[in-house]
Amino acid sequence: MQDKTIMDKQELMEEFDIARMAYPGKKRGLDVEFENFRKKHKKWHLLIPLLLPAIEYHKAWRVKAAGWNSNVIYNSKDRLHIAFWKNFSTWINQSCWTDEYPEPWGIKPKAKPVPQPEPVVPLTVEERIRIRKQFQAKLALSKAKRKESR
């Protein structure tokens, strides 16, 4: 990623596609999702860099919550609800990258205590570049396969 504060539309679309591909729920095509995102959010170009870290945070939270739930009595009020992944368009339309999730890791559950999980650290620029390159390579490979099948 360049050091510019404003990226051009193509770079933003690539960054959006990386986040879209990292999202584990159901999703539609890039063009459809990107246009939906642009129509729904006026300052979309400022929001795109927030998507991938939010998705990574949500994935990490789900792993921690599952570990927490495995150490808590089944019908206890201390159990965390882990919802299914929303469709990507729903996640975008509801601005779910701003969601905060309960983190009772420091509270003693009614069963054996859970070891304190490592805090989620925001992605560094180098990590974002590495992830972006991985997804670009994956995208190029899938485009090449589609060309071959035609």
Image (cartoon, grey):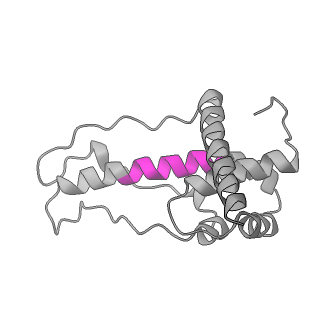
Give the image location of residue 84, x and y in percent.
Answer: 42, 69
Judged by its main secondary structure, the magenta piece is: helix
In-image side of 140 versus 45 (left or right): left
Given residues 79 and 138, the one toward you in this image is: 138
Residue at 70 percent of width and 45 percent of height: 49
52 sits to left or right of 63: right
Q: Quadrant of the C terminus?
A: bottom right
Give the answer, above or below, for where 40 lies relative to 5.
Answer: below
Q: Is residue 61 magenta?
A: yes
- Taking depth in this image into account, of 147 and 109 the one nearest to the observer is 147
Residue located at (36% from left, 34% from top): 118
Q: Residue at x 65, y 65 (%)?
A: 92
Q: Position of residue 60 (x, y in %)?
A: 42, 47
Please identify the quarter of the rendering in which residue 120 is found.
Answer: top left
Q: Is residue 21 left or right of residue 29?
A: left
Quadrant of the image for the N terminus?
top right
Q: Is residue 119 above or below residue 30?
A: above
Location of residue 7 by image quarter: top right
Residue 15 is a magenta residue: no
Q: Residue at x 84, y 36 (%)?
A: 5
**Count of number-bearing discs:** 0
Residue 75 % position (x, y): 16, 69
The x, y position of residue 2, in whole percent, is: 80, 31
| Image-quadrant location for residue 4 | top right
Q: What range of the chain is rendered magenta?
A: 50-62
